[in-house]
Amino acid sequence: MEKTLNLRVHKRSFNENSNLNEEILINQKDVPDVIIGDVVEIYHIEDEESRLLLQVTSLSDEFQQKGTVSIEQSIANTFQLRAYKDVIVKKVDPKGVALDLVEMLFKDQYFSRSDFWRMRNGIIGTCVYLNKKIEHAEMRQQVMEMWSKGERVMCGTITEETRIVYRSSTAVVQIFIQMSSEMWDFDILGEDLYFEKALNGFLTDLFAKWKEQNCQHDVTIVLFSRTFYKAQSLDEFPEYMRDCIVCDYKGRYYQDFYRIVVQNERYDDWTSTMILLRKLCNSYKDKILNYHKQKGHKAPAAYNSTAAQGNFLETLNMSLNLFEGYYIDRNFDRTGKVAVVITPGAGVFEVDRELANITKQRTIDCGIGSDLVCMGEQPLHAAPLFKFHNKLAKTSLEVGDDYNIPHWMNHSFYISKSQIKARLQGSFIPRIKPPPEFNETQRRPSERKLLAHSPNKQIQDENNIPFVDYDEYDAQIWKLPTPNSTRFGSLKFSYQTRRQPQTMAEAKQIKKPRKRNVSDDYPSMAVEKGERRGSPAINIPTLSRSSSSEDISSSVGCYPIIKKPSSKESNESAETDDSFFMRRIVGSAESPVGYSRKHIHQAKSRRALINPFAPSRMQFKMTSNRRRWVHAFPTDPQGAAVQTHHYHMYNKRESSATLEKKLSRDSLKMSQLSMDMKTQSSFSNFDSTEKFSEKFSEPSSLNRIPSGLVSEDKFYVGSVDSSPTSSVQNLERLFQGSSLTSTLQHNSASDLGSLGGRGMKKARENRSYLWGPTGEQEWSPDMTTGQDWFPAHGCQTDSCLVKPILTADIHSQNFCAGISVDWKSLTMPASLPITTDYFPDKRSLENDYTVSQYTLIPEDVNSEFYSSPPVTEDDKFYRRQPLSVTELFRELISQRLAQGFQIITKKKPPKQPLDTMSVGASPQFQHTSSLIRARPRSGPQEEIYLSIGLIFHKLTLSGQTIQVTQYRPRHEQRQLKYLYHYRFQVPDSPSYDVSTSQFKNEKLENYNWNYLDQYICTRGEGDYGLLDPLKYWRSRFFLLPCNNPATRKIIEGNDSIWPRCDIYQTRSKQELQQLISGFVRFLETLNKMRRTAQTRRQKHSGDNVSSTPTSDQQTSQASQKEAVLLSVTMASSKLIEAMKDPQTGLSMLPRQTGLPESCFIAEEAVDWCIQNIQEVKDVTSGIGLMQRLQDEHYICHSSGNPQHKFIHGFYLYNIVSPKDKPKSDMYGPSYNYLFQNEWCEVSILPVVRERAEVPLFTMDESPCQVSELWVNQLINDWRVLSGIDTGAQGWGQQSGSRVNLCAMKATLTHKYVQVDVDGNNKSDRPEWASARYHAYYSPNAAFELQLQWMVATGPILQDLVTTWGRKAQACGFHLLPVPGDPFALPSAPDSDPLRGPIFVPLDIASLSQGGKPVFHDLDQVAKSKKLLHFQDEIIKRYGFMPINVCVSETHRHYMSDEQQQYVHCTGGMFILMESSQVTSSPKVIKISSRVSKKSAGELRKDYIARQNSNTSNTEVVTQNKVGFLWSWNFMSSKRWRSPNTGDEIFQDRMLADFRQFCANENNRLKEFWNDFNLMFAL
């Protein structure tokens, strides 16, 4: 169908019922064959290049214009479609325009990975175009980029096979800048220092791109380095330095330093940060190297490490410790996490092997992006590159280096403007940094003769490592063998010469060549003395062959001893019992790692080493870890996943295309490379046929040609240049002259591509390249990380993966170095894809995995609900509908995705169940067809596979049953641990503090999936509740009073006139009563009570008193008369009638589902009694009167529990009608056991006295009592009053066969309640959450509310919390997010290693008078009490309030054992007041770096003791440091800030002034001390 229509445009309408909401409006009469859901193509006749695809979603009768088609205006503008011009409208097949990859962009939202999957399911089958905005279940996203068949496109359709990548412009970004010694070197052009290149170049460009893309990342910037000390033993260090000194494997002593510049900041303009960075970088080196120098103490000389020797992996693990707690302190406006490391080096790092394994596994399991940006020149070898520590160098004969290429890390090389300009001018830019000049004359002759010697002089001479002429060795290594060379050969050795060899020939004569073993984990083997095995390893040439021999080298890359037969069915190498058939371990190639010992069976196993200069010659078995990120990358025209910022130029010559067509994409790797090849070009590769792979490839080196097959013409297919024509001829000659002739002679050249298709596809699935995150992109020396600066004539390519030439002015400020850096990853980091394509084969599952299964039958688990379903609306409110079997199946998938699993796309479910197949279609089954059709359906059938690491899950839905099959490795992965010591300095801290952190990989197989599945099945309302091992999400909030005049005064103060910050006043009794009234209104919002102003009368006589009569004067007079008549001596029935009076009585709640009639709030009832009953003067007497009415069964708790006592606060009670009065105090049938699950009830501490009425403190009172925060547990325990502790009765008892978890988990200070997350039914699934909140509220303290969930959508929760925050402001509060533990120490298991509280010391010594100590006349107990009161009064003057009430069994409660935390009324700062014991003779403790089990208070005391531990006077640290721990609220972003919260300037002023006050500047502390003594009565 093709139709010519006239184009119109329309603006989108926000009216849901309007047809203008549609993207395309078309008259069905013009296109009769188009139906809803079809995809049409629209383009101008004269401009066929700009084509638009749209999906018809509506055929409204309202659009009657014939011969026209209308498109939404913004879409027409994007695709340059002109109105009133004719366009071609053509119906297309959705499969023909299907997309391979779609990148979605979102901002200011939190999505879990299960939300990604639900969004993907919601857009399958739809048509998308560039910048299209999509919304699903309140989740908003925008189409950013689309790929199809290796090309970037503007529109297309999304199918089941389309891979979707989600990118966030509001992520958590940690930028680490390595301040190694190279940072102060000039770059290769000699124009800038490397740190200037990093700051003025890369970071400036990065921040510019963030601003251009409107990114609002949560950024932390850290400077880090490693400092070595010239010392031979620890005794050379002063005592105060030894706590953090570490000795490495070479015996060198070092310390690691971290300087946090900014932490969790979101800026629109990073100019001020760049200025700060430049200042810190200029002074960093001198400060670190001289940090420990003190007068009177001699410290070893310090020097900065190189980039390769630095603490690179340790830094990555620091960020992993933070990122692994993604579910803790969950913020609703950020998604994604990425760690960026900026290094001046070339991407080579010397690392510990065990730490590298930990880092790799943690990074892959967490799905965290790690970007390495190198300021140095791109080397001629693969990068990044790890060089493993050789810890046995001193005790073994190993002289080689072991390398590894981390595929799990994204890397880029930043190219400065100067380098771009030089390359544009044709200047030569070296890619090797010249080493420092070495004066050969200063070397001793003995050092020139012997490069290595045996560490043990008594060992036999034949075991000494000989002199090695590396030049001659390299020449032999790279010399290509002759065609007559044999692959395996025996070598003869002579051991007659005993003197030290002086030449290579002598070394070859007396030494055995090194044997390169296949594995490092097989048992030691005894080999017969006469047994001779050929070895394909590259050996140092021996005297038995001439130096010009060309048959000593096999393929450079992998060197197996014995070829191991590979399975056609398995993706992994099968294990056998033969000790010689061992798998290969990756290491470095061409290194003389070891030499044969006298006793071969005592030799340790070796590794098949990696050649960093030719990593593509080795291919390795595919694993799930290797394919974890592959679906995040686009594919080139040949179908291989590639990184677009890694550019590899392809020749566009016809001969190359012919070769590509003939031999397919991946060529058969030729394994030798001549050193004298000087011309360079690129050719496509091809995978060999399956037979060829099996016959000639090694277990971990796919498609490697044996050395005997290498032709004489030095041909290399890959990234090495030669003439394409000669290359084709060489390849043909190779096939003709090799043993492949018999294998390929039945295949013509024309069908070679089809022959290789199956083999290539299978090989590509089972094998991968060592380099690169994709495993499908081949590395070569001429591959660079960006070619946008290339001249136009040099970019010859037929692939859209190469971006256009950058046309921006190189001298402009906004100029960025093209795609030399992966700007997309750094600007809009991608989340881990939800799909992968790896699954082990049947044989591997049987041999390497253990299988466990369990079955879920929702009908059986929720049988109680189905046996007696709820009837009334109230019953349905408390007993919600369980999940259906389909909903449960979808949710089980969602939960696994949220915990890091990925859906395996290649494992397709069965097409049809047996009972739905048309068996009767065949003539021989016609007699059974009617029986099959008559059989009832058993329900839906579905199967899905998921994986994470080496763990695989299969979920099978069959009818009403869900079966979960788990595949775990038979040999579990060992948990590795690494203890790390370091120093770090946070912003606003004056020194580098000592800390420790532990790095360990997580054992994913220990996750209790059976428990979580049961929790989902019961909606969290049964016997299965939320536990910490489940990693449930949680967000903590504080409700704080706002509108404080002192805050506004400080904010409005000028910089020149710095206002004092100790100006906060205690609130009056009337203000506290208003806060209580506002708190009650806020709880009405939490409980979703719709209460109008007419149903809520003025409650407090002191509030808003009017001097003039109102229109309700008669009502007021009647109220006063009624109040005079009411008395506590009256009959209870009279009082109840007065309460029920519609004019003067108690304000009742409107009728609401789940509540009985005549329901009221306890706090309002007590207040009504105070105002209307003569004898009731305070809250206590009002509570007594209401308890009397309850004892007489006139009122009852709304749950129907007669045992529930009357509790003052937001507790719900109702007036009992005479017919509902219970005859006894026992529980009746109306008792609702589930009441507490649904209603948030809080006990409110009354305001008893005005502060002016209590001018003095007494030692019998604690600060909690003075502030009316004290709760006597013996009298006011809400659990006792509500009946929870009455044995088997009360809320704690079972409801049917289940336990009320909200009651069971409740404590004295905290309660739990279910949260209706999706009250407006915006989600596409049932959702629920729970809340943990304070059981008591005081207007003098903060109120805590913590959300906890497993099944909830982030944006829907965000809308709910936003609604709460908006209602809180109307009630006189602000609701702010806060950390779960504001004072978490960096050494804590789940805390940020680079975050710690700041210690502010209190200068007690300045308070002494007459030379006597301040507390000289008091005993120890009195000293602590008075100091406690003094500290409490200080922080109250600064606007801090306790975060909770004080609970104690006795009247005398003091904070001697537990610490009290305070939060500022603006919510931006926290203070912790340690309980310090002031003694006349301070105790002396020794700082120890050992980790021991201590309480939180002891750990904090140790943390304080370590403050300023670098100074000379800290050889002994006193334990009686008095002061405060200060912490920032890093959860409060700009979204939560208002004039009531202040900004960063306000917070900085608060800390600065608080420090000045505590340091007694201007005698302020002493003046306050004198005032305090007047109030304190002994």
Image (cartoon, helix red, strand yellow):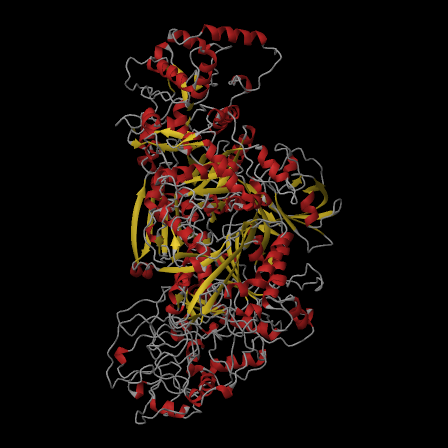
The residue nearer to you, when weighing 1000 against 91, is 1000
Please indicate, yes or no, whether residue 482 appears anywhere in the rendered image: no
Residue at the extreme right of the image, as rendered: 84
Compared with residue 499, is residue 721 higher up or lower down, i.e. above or below?
above
The residue nearer to you, when weighing 849 against 963, is 849
Q: Residue at x 24, y 78 (%)?
A: 526
Q: Position of residue 895 (x, y in %)?
A: 41, 45
Relative placement, left or right, of 364 versus 167 is: left
Q: Position of residue 411 (x, y in %)?
A: 53, 64
The image quarter in which residue 875 lies: top left
From the image, which quarter does the C terminus lie in?
top left
The image quarter in which residue 958 lies: top left
The residue nearer to you, when weighing 1319 against 633, is 1319
The image quarter in which residue 36 lies: top right
Q: Residue at x 37, y 31 (%)?
A: 1260
Residue at the extreme front of the image, as rendered: 1410
Compared with residue 1402, is residue 232 higher up or lower down, i.e. above or below?
below
Q: Position of residue 322 (x, y in %)?
A: 45, 52
Compared with residue 179, is residue 1062 higher up or lower down, i.e. above or below?
above
Compared with residue 519, is residue 1181 higher up or lower down, i.e. above or below?
above
